[in-house]
Image: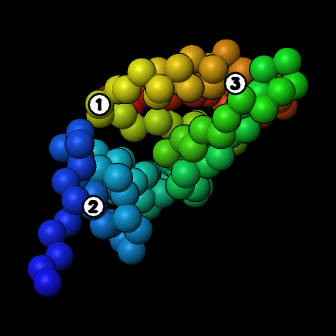
Amino acid sequence: MVFIPKKNKYNAKSTNYNGYNYDSKKEAGYAMDLDWKIKAGLVDRFERQHKFDLRVNDEHICNYYIDFKVYYTDGHIEYVEVKGFETDVWRLKWRITKATFSDMTKGEDSQLVLFK
């Protein structure tokens, strides 16, 4: 029996970088850029696949996993979504994320970033 890997319907190529699997080359490239920013002293650290609990009127709607949570050395935080192909479901979740972002990050010096 021959194993044939399933092709991604959006033509994204799963990529391994530094021991981690990323959904696309673009996402792995962004992780590489973050590693360079750490070496340059601009970024302290970053997390992959940070979970947001999306709530409206205190009711759980869904979870949203943003690609990176980046901690900069100056104290601010960026939540970064690396996007290639946009689906209707993603657009809806992104709109809810943007609308509820300030409630989810109260007290943080943070911003939401879309990297296309």
Q: Residues within 10 Å of mark 1 (few under 14, many from 20)?
A: few
Spot occupied by residue 78 in the image (x, y as percentages of width and height):
58, 36
Which amino acid type is marked by label 1?
Phe
Amino acid at pointer 2: Thr
- Residue 15 is labelled as 2
**Residue 115 drawn at (x, y percent):** 38, 31
Instruction: Choose the circle earlier in sequence order: 2 or 1.
Output: 2
Asked if residue 60 lies left or right of residue 30, the reply is right
- Callout in the foreground (2, 1): 1
Residue 104 position by quadrant: top right
Q: Residue at x 72, y 21 (%)?
A: 100
Whole-number angstrom distance, CA of label 2 to CA of label 3: 29 Å
Q: What is the number of the mark on residue 101?
A: 3
- The kind of secondary structure element at disc 1 is loop
Mark 2 is surrounded, within 10 Å at the Cα level, by few (under 14), some (14 to 19) or many (20 or more) other residues, namely: some
Which disc is residue 11 wearing?
Answer: none
Image marks 2 and 3: residues in contact by CB distance under 8 Å: no
- Sequence-wise, which precedes: disc 3 or disc 1? 1
The CA span between labels 3 and 1 is 22 Å
Residue 85 - label:
1
